Image: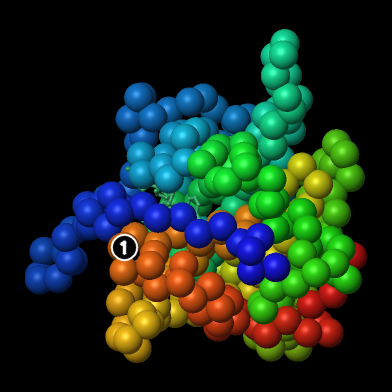
């Protein structure tokens, strides 16, 4: 299974501009890149409530972001229209078949909460073309496939990961209300696994801010939720020195991880087991609760 995990190296991200620390008496409101996205990055509106924009710091080409057209908190539970707009993008990408081309898939992910890899508070879903995630892999990326899709088969070796995931299949043409019902079921099971908010009744669990950190992934065929308890873990080189931190966001549910320094890259490539150990620390241990439907 470890060989089906994809490790990416993006040194340029280490130099990505960071917002200035917000200290001192005149605390400035942090910049929100999704409040008024520039026209060069704006693709088009998706329904009345969402807008598709390009990611300014994309790791793979065509990395798009689906933002709410007016501010909504990233930390709040998703609504039916968030999921419907995401599914509409996934479907449209799949159905758009030009002559001589093959059908292509989108991988959608959402980071929610302090341990999930999230940084922007304005609600947004991220969309990655699966074909672009294969670019550059050996033999056209035949050995790698999207982890979220593999998780529906609980007995397959390729579905085994050291953190709990909750997954349901999606019917073709699934509508907004059904997507929302699937999301709420998966979220409730993730809360149970994380032992958080359970016993307070659905009313408290399914309103307002999420009670857990989690990543959500969606493809044409599945929705997955992974409860998160840590953003990542330290990377250690052969001499036993800590050379950096591996941080994982929702792309972990595609079966990928990203490093930003050569030392981290070398340490993880020479010792792939270490990647597995870090993955074992980011969520709830996989076990009987982590069953699939
Ligand atoms: P968040 O949910 O808030 O956080 P994130 O994905 O972890 O992004 P962040 O920017 O914190 O992470 P990192 O440097 O590690 O998403 C915010 C999104 O908005 C990000 O996609 C960000 O790039 C984008 N954004 C920020 N400012 C913007 C602006 N002014 N205009 C438009 N978009 C803006 O990672 C950088 C990127 O690499 C992220 O997109 C991340 O999703 C991606 N990535 C990480 N692991 C990956 C992997 N294994 N494969 C492919 N891509 C990967």
Is residue 128 in view from this perspective?
A: no
Q: Tell me where residue 103 appears, x and y as whole percent.
A: 74, 28
Q: Is residue 105 left or right of residue 176?
A: left
Q: Quadrant of residue 11?
A: bottom left
Is residue 71 in view from this perspective?
A: yes
Extreme residue in the left direction: 25
**Which residue is identified by label 1?**
262
Q: What residue is rendered at 62% in x and 42% in y?
A: 139
Q: What residue is rendered at 35% in x and 24% in y?
A: 40
Q: Quadrant of the C terminus?
A: bottom right
Q: What residue is rendered at 85% in x and 67% in y?
A: 156
Mark 1 residue's CB less than 8 Å from ligand 1 = no
Q: Tell me where residue 166 appears, x and y as whole percent.
A: 76, 69
Q: Is residue 65 above or below residue 225?
A: above
Q: Tell me where residue 128 appears, x and y as whole percent.
A: 56, 42
Q: Tell me where residue 245 appears, x and y as whole percent.
A: 37, 74
């Amino acid at each position: 299974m470890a060989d089906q995990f994809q490790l990416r190296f993006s040194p340029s991200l280490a130099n990505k501009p960071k917002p200035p620390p917000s200290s001192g008496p005149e605390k400035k409101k942090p910049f929100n890149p999704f409040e008024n996205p520039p026209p060069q990055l704006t693709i088009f509106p998706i329904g009345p409530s969402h807008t598709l924009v390009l990611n300014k710091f994309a790791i793979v080409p065509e990395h798009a972001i689906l933002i709410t057209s007016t501010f909504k908190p990233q930390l709040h539970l998703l609504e039916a229209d968030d999921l419907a707009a995401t599914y509409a993008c996934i479907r449209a990408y799949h159905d758009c078949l030009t002559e001589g081309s093959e059908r292509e898939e989108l991988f959608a992910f959402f980071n929610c909460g302090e341990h999930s890899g999230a940084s922007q508070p304005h609600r947004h879903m991220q969309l990655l073309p699966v074909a672009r995630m294969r670019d550059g892999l050996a033999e056209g990326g035949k050995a790698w496939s999207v982890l979220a899709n593999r998780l529906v088969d609980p007995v397959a070796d390729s579905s085994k990961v050291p953190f709990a995931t909750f997954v349901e299949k999606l019917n073709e043409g699934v509508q907004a209300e059904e997507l929302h019902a699937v999301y709420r079921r998966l979220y409730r099971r993730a809360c149970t696994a994380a032992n958080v908010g359970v016993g307070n009744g659905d009313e408290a669990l399914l309103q307002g801010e999420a009670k857990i950190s989690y990543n959500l992934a969606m493809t044409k065929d599945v929705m997955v939720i992974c409860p998160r308890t840590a953003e990542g873990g330290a990377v250690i080189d052969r001499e036993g020195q800590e050379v950096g931190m591996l941080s994982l966001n929702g792309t972990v549910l595609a079966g990928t991880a990203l490093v930003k320094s050569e030392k981290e890259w070398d340490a993880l490539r020479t010792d792939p087991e270490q990647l597995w150990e870090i993955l074992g620390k980011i969520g709830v241990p996989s076990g009987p609760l982590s069953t699939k439907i």
